[in-house]
Image: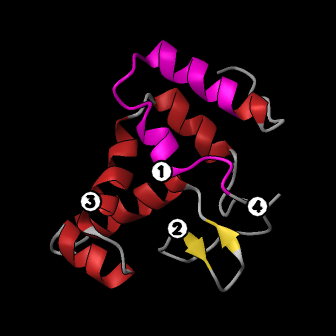
Amino acid sequence: MPIGPSNSITVIDRLNDSYRNPVSLAIEWKKALKDGKYATQRALAQDVGVHRTSVAKTLSLLDLDKDVIRAVEFLGDPLPGPLVTVAGLHDLVNLSPNDQKRKLKEHLRGKGITILGL
């Protein structure tokens, strides 16, 4: 499991050779935008070195069910590898809360992780 928090604002933290939790990253990016550190998603994307659509997709993870968000946050940040990805989580956004939870549980079970209470 990860040791301590990461301060990287990118998905791959090359300094610590680790993978950022996409939900934690979305929370950080939303705060950076809200606090005015970046005027637009495009400015954030330029600074981070990703396409604006990647920023939008990452931020859309905050539309997941609150229990799903908490479960993904519980995995820690940074992650030891891509246990969950922006693309994989983004596929859940338009599902019902129950389907989001079911799909996340199935995905994590396939990685040997069980989240109780989800």
Q: Residues within 10 Å of mark 2 (few under 14, many from 20)?
A: many
Observer-nearest of 22 and 5 = 22
Which type of secondary structure does the marked residue at label 2 adopt?
A: loop
Q: Earlier in the sequence, mark 3 or mark 4?
A: 3
Residue 37 shows up from this direction: no
Above or below: residue 28 compared with residue 56: below
Q: Position of residue 117 (x, y in %)?
A: 70, 20
Identify the magenta region. 82-107
> On the picture, is 44 further left or further right than 82?
left
Q: How many marks?
A: 4
Which residue is labeled 2 in the image? 11
Which type of secondary structure does the marked residue at label 3 adopt?
A: helix
Q: Of the numbered discs in the image, which one, if any, rests on residue 80? A: 4
Which quadrant would residue 14 be assigned to in this image? bottom right
Q: Of the numbered discs in the image, which one, if any, rests on residue 53? A: 3
Gap between marks 3 and 4, in whole Å?
25 Å
Which amino acid type corresponds to the residue marked 2 in the rendered image? Val
Which amino acid type corresponds to the residue marked 4 in the rendered image? Pro
The residue at 32%/62% (across/down) is 55
Q: Position of residue 108 (x, y in %)?
A: 71, 34
